Image: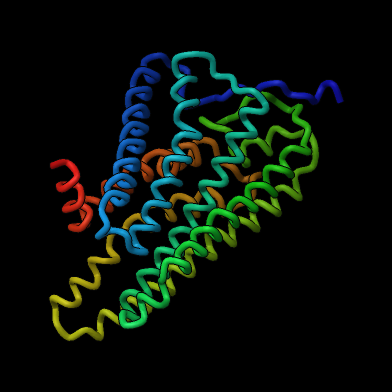
Amino acid sequence: MNQTQVIEFLILGFSETPQLQMLFFPAFLLLYMVALSGNLLIMVVIGSSPALHTPMYFFLVNLAMVDILCTSTILPKLLGSMVAKRTISYGGCIVQVFFFTWSLGAELLLFSAMAYDRYVAVCWPLHYSTLMDPQVCRLLAMAVWMVSLANTSVNTGLLLRLPFCHSKVVQHFFCEIPPLLKLSCAPTHLNEVMAFTADMILAVGNFSVIMLSYICIIASILRIRSAAGKQRAFSTCSSHLLVVTLYYSTVIYTYIHPASRYSLDKDKVVSVIYTSVAPSLNPLIYSLRNTDVKAALRRLLS
C-alpha cells in the first residue's frame, strides 16, 4: 500500500518545447483575462440595471458565475505550470477535479433552464410572468447547483478510493477523471459506469431537453405571420442556441465514451474549447448580439 500512495502528479501539458510554451502562455493568459473580465462585466451590468432583472438575465448571471468557476479552476494552474514546475499535489488534483466537474454539470443544466425560459417566453408569452416568477427561477437555479454538486461529490468520492501506481504523469493539461482513471492500479469499472451514467444524463439528457424546447420554439415562430415578429422571436433565442451548439459539440465528443478509449491528442485539443474558449466567448456572444445588454453597458460606462 505504501507504494501506491501518490503525493503529487506531473501535468504533461501541451508541449515541452520552450518555443511552443512561449506561444501557449500569452494565448491562455488572454483567454483567462477575457473570460474573467467579460463574465464579471456581465454580472455587474445586469446587477446594476433594473431593466435586466428578468429570468433570462438571472440565468445569464448564473452562467457567468459557472464560467468564472471553470476557468479559475483550470487556467491559473495551467499558466503556472508553463513558467514553473508542472507538478500538482494529490489534494490539489482532487480539488481541481471536484470544482471542474461541478462547473461542467452546472453549465449543462443551466443551458436546459435557459432553454425552458425561452420556450415559455415564445410559446406561452401570456403566462410567462406566472410560469417564470422569481421563486421559480430561484428554485431552478438552486436545482442546477445542487444536482451538479451531487454529481461531482459522487464521482470525486469514487476517485478518492482508488490507489495510483501505474504512473504519476497526467496526460492532460489539468486533472480530469478520464486521464486519472488510466493511472489507477485498481479496477475502475464502477468509476467508469458512474461517470458514463452521469455524462449520459447531464449531457445527452439535457441536450434532448434543449432540442425538444427548440423544436417547439421553431414551430411557434413559424406560426407567426409577420416577418418582423419572426425575427424578433428568433433573436431572443439565437445567442443561447449558438452557445449551446459550441459547448455541446465538444462536451459530447469528449465524454460519451469509456475512459479506456480516452485519446490524448484529440481530447486535449477539444477540452480547450469548453474549458477556455467557450467561457471567453459567452459574454461576447450574449452582449454583442443583445441590444438590451449593450444599452445597459453604455449607461454603465457613461
Left or right: 240, with 225 as reference point: right
The number of discs equals: 0
The color scheme shown is rainbow
Name the image quarter holding residue 143: bottom right
Q: Which residue of the protein is positioned furthest toward the right in this rendering?
A: 1
As drawn, 126 above or below 196? below
Residue at x-position 24% and y-position 73%: 233
Indicate the position of residue 103 as horizontal and vertical percent values: 51, 46
As drawn, 59 above or below 26? below
Q: Is residue 89 visible?
A: yes
Residue at x-position 49% and y-position 56%: 108
Left or right: 250, with 56 as reference point: right
As drawn, 85 above or below 243? above
Name the image quarter holding residue 96: top right
Residue at x-position 48% and y-position 51%: 251
Indicate the position of residue 272 as horizontal and vertical percent values: 43, 38
Quadrant for the C terminus, please: top left
Q: Is residue 241 visible?
A: no
Q: Nearer the viewer, residue 36 or 279?
A: 36
Residue at x-position 18% and y-position 57%: 291
Quadrant for the N terminus, please: top right
Indicate the position of residue 20 as horizontal and vertical percent values: 38, 20
Left or right: 113, with 6 as reference point: left
